[in-house]
Image (cartoon, rainbow, N blue to C red):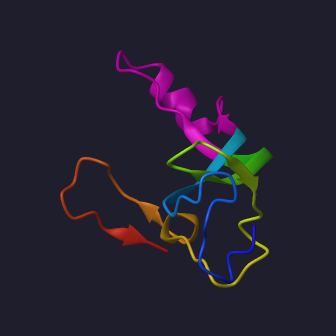
């Protein structure tokens, strides 16, 4: 599907689409550091120390909202679409006006 022109679904002629991304990440949290050792002696819950997030796989596609047809799409191959969420993180989903980081 060529997004450099107006998008029209070849199957139903629909013009409303969603870009979707399915991703699998591996999160790593450090335990048994000197800091958590001291905390583990206390009665409070033990916090995890975030270490790393590794992308294991991802699948991006454009989906027609009218008929559900799916068209493969690579988010990073086109400079005409920019996703704020890919570039920045939202601090909280319950804040009415979230502060964007990054």
Position of 97 compared to 89: left or right? left
Q: Residue at x 71, y 66 (%)?
A: 75
**Looking at the rendering, which quadrant does residue 34 occupy?**
top right
Position of 69 compared to 84: left or right? right
Residue 95: where, in percent of width, then height? 21, 54
Q: In the rendered structure, does residue 69 fall within the stretch colored magenta?
A: no
Q: Outermost residue, top direction?
A: 43
Q: Nearer the viewer, residue 48 or 10?
A: 10
Residue 8: where, in percent of width, then height? 61, 67
Q: Outermost residue, left direction?
A: 96
Q: Residue at x 69, y 44 (%)?
A: 23
Vertical placement of 96 versus 69: above or below?
Answer: below
**Looking at the rendering, which quadrant does residue 26 occupy?**
top right
Q: Quadrant of the N terminus?
A: bottom right
Q: Nearer the viewer, residue 49 or 14?
A: 14
Residue 72: where, in percent of width, then height? 78, 55
**Looking at the rendering, which quadrant does residue 29 occupy?**
top right
Q: Outermost residue, front direction?
A: 12
Q: How many marks?
A: 0
Query: What are the residue bounds of the magenta stretch?
Result: 26-51
Q: Residue at x 53, y 33 (%)?
A: 48
Q: Residue at x 49, y 21 (%)?
A: 40
Residue 13: where, in percent of width, then height? 58, 60
Q: Nearer the viewer, residue 5 or 73?
A: 5
Vertical placement of 43 versus 72: above or below?
Answer: above
């Amino acid at each position: 599907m060529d997004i450099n022109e107006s998008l029209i679904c070849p199957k139903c002629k629909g013009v409303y689409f969603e870009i979707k991304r399915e991703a699998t990440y591996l999160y790593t949290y450090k335990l048994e550091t000197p800091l958590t050792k001291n905390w583990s002696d206390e009665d409070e819950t033990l916090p995890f120390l975030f270490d790393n997030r590794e992308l294991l796989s991802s699948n991006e596609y454009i989906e027609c909202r009218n008929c559900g047809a799916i068209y493969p799409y690579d988010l990073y191959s086109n400079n005409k679409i920019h996703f704020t969420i890919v570039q920045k993180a939202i601090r909280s989903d319950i804040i009415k006006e979230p502060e964007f980081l990054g």
